[in-house]
Image (cartoon, rainbow, N blue to C red):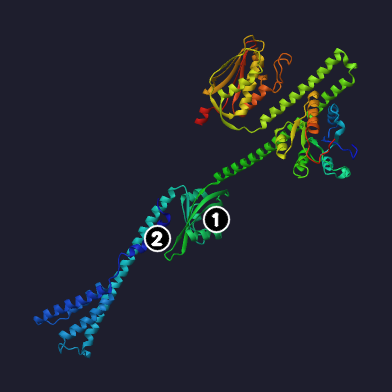
Amino acid sequence: MINPVRAFDGANVLKGKSALSTPLSPIQCYGIAVLSVLGALAAGLLLERFELRNISPFLLAITVAAWYGGIRSALLALVASFISFHFFFVEPLHSLRFTGSDLPYFIFFAVLALLVSWFKAAQQNVEGELREANERLEMAERIKQQASLLNLTHDSIFVRNMDFVITYWNQGAQELYGWPAEDAIGKDSKQLLHTVFSTPLDDINTELLRSGRWEGELRRTTANSIQIVVAARWSLQRNDRGEPAAILETSNNITEHKRREQEIQALNQELAKRSSELEAMNKELEAFAYTVSHDLRAPLRHISGYSELLQKTAASILADQTSRRYMTIILESVKRMGSLIDDLLSFSRIGRAETRKSLVNLTQLVKEAVNEIRQQAEGRDVVWKISTLPEFYGDRSMLRLVLINLLSNAVKFTRPRAQPEIEIGCVNGSRGEMAVFVRDNGIGFDMKYVNKLFGVFQRLHSADSFEGTGIGLATVQRIIHRHGGKVWAEGAVDKGATFYFQLSGHKENYGNS
Amino acid sequence: METVNKLGRILMVEDDSKDVELTLEALKDYNLANEVVVTHDGEQALDYIYCRGEYKLRSGENPAVILLDLKLPKVDGMEVLKQIKSDAKLKMIPVVVLTSSREERDMVSSYQLGVNAYVVKPVDFHEFVNAIKELGAFWAVINEPPPGSARK
């Protein structure tokens, strides 16, 4: 991944290049001058051996020093050449007494040094300019390449200066905001995009200056006047002096994401509202059940009580058989109404009570239930067949109620049988889940009415033949449903009945999920 | 309304006049009926217990037992129970909740407040009569009430 900030750091690139042609150190400059003058002196002395007094070695020395050593070297070479020439080659020899006749030599040397230095400087200038132009070209090419790379990304990338003026705008920015680069560059980014900041700009700037970065959400408007939300990341670029110079922003469109987030939030609020409504309804139901419990019993008690009192006070009138029968019916009906109310209340309590789940050993629970039911079947020789049953996660006391209800039904409806048989076992139900069943060889039922079996106060037999209020199977169904399971029955008239239930909290399933 | 100065060993707090009648009927057998003071709501009951309002002039003895219904006008039974059991001078008075409610939360709250017994009024009259008789006999006759209680 290229660092976009680095890519645009042209100033640094240029500085790095020019640093390569460092100027000579003073020692090197003066060294060149001294060496060339010494060379010229040696050449001059050599030529004098052959009676040739010549100025040209010194001119050459000045030229060399000026060309290669620069102006300082040229000055030293000029002075040294003049002194050497005057000392060794001008009459009187070996003296440093200057006269006016020496001036033309000096001027000649000086003009030469000046000319050469000037040429050298001009040449260096031209060279430098050429090199700079070349480097600029190279950099422009590099930036172009990197910019085209930035265009490959789908992220929107743009660079702006500290006054928000856009200086770079990639293809992604064009796609996101709808403005082409030529329209965007030079514009104020805040105005162009109608940026709305979620945090005060001052805070953002503080963060940028502190860490060089900022991340956040911005609301903007595209060229097509569509409002969007973007997740923006800003990086601050500083110039050579360390002052903030530009900001590079990458951003992507999170409008859809935000919309979904809001949807989820709205749904959550709705859910919270619903659940509080449900809670209120539950409370209401509880209050209702309380009223039923308290207020429906009182009139019953009064009917029963005053009937008895009437029986006492009007004993002589109510002595006949018919009156006594009527009285019995009144009192029995009251009793029945009382147990209906009690059943309804305990049924509603099952719906309201919290389930306390634990690992329940069904085999053990069945044994307990059978022991309890045996008393009900006293005097009858019931054959119990109990298989080993799986373990379930469930509310123990509720599951116990399920078994008690199913077993007591089985006992009740096998009453006409000389040899009652009740079997408790389990089979593989649909989807491979274990289903527990209670099977009896009792009077059975017509499959036509199978749907009525689990209704509240639904009975398939008259109260005279089999007692009960018809709440048992409704209770079973409610408990099983509260465990996320299902319950069903099979049977035929006079051929017994089988009740199945399946719980979603089967131990193996529970472990796998 | 009972006579203001009537002294009884049993304070009955019951808003339903029929229940009152049936209760008194049941207590007749043990000659306890005329030992009963009936108040019809929680406020009246508290007035009786604290000897204030219409009961300002009664002698200060505490009843030997209070038969308390829970669902009462004005101040409900639970509140009456709470006041009795949180008053150092009154908390020794045996209180029996006598109610139609079989709701677990009512039983739990009553026992938490320190009720001495919780009896659900049976729907069947015979059972009702038996329950009341036994209650009356036990608390007003067999049980030795705390000092300061009304005695025969």
State the residue in front, A419 or A2.
Answer: A419
Could you tell which of marks 2 and 1 lies nearer the N-terminus?
A: 2
Q: Is residue A180 above or below residue A34?
A: above
Q: Identify residue for label 2.
A: A10
Separation (CA) of disc 2 from disc 1? 27 Å
Q: Residue furthest top?
A: A418
Inspect this view and state whether residue A80 appears: yes
Inspect this view and state whether residue A445 appears: no
Q: Identify residue for label 1.
A: A192
Q: Is residue A448 left or right of residue A40?
A: right
Q: Quadrant of residue A318?
A: top right
- Label 1: how many Cα within 10 Å (few below 14, some 14–19, many 20+): some
Labels 2 and 1 share a subunit:
yes
Q: Quadrant of residue B22?
A: top right
Residue A64, position as x, y percentages in the image: 22, 74
- Please name the amino acid that badge 1 sits on: Leu
Residue at 77% in and 37% down: B94
How many badges with numbers are in the image? 2
Q: Nearer the viewer, mark 2 or mark 1?
A: 2
- Label 2: how many Cα within 10 Å (few below 14, some 14–19, many 20+): some
Residue at 73% in and 15% down: A462
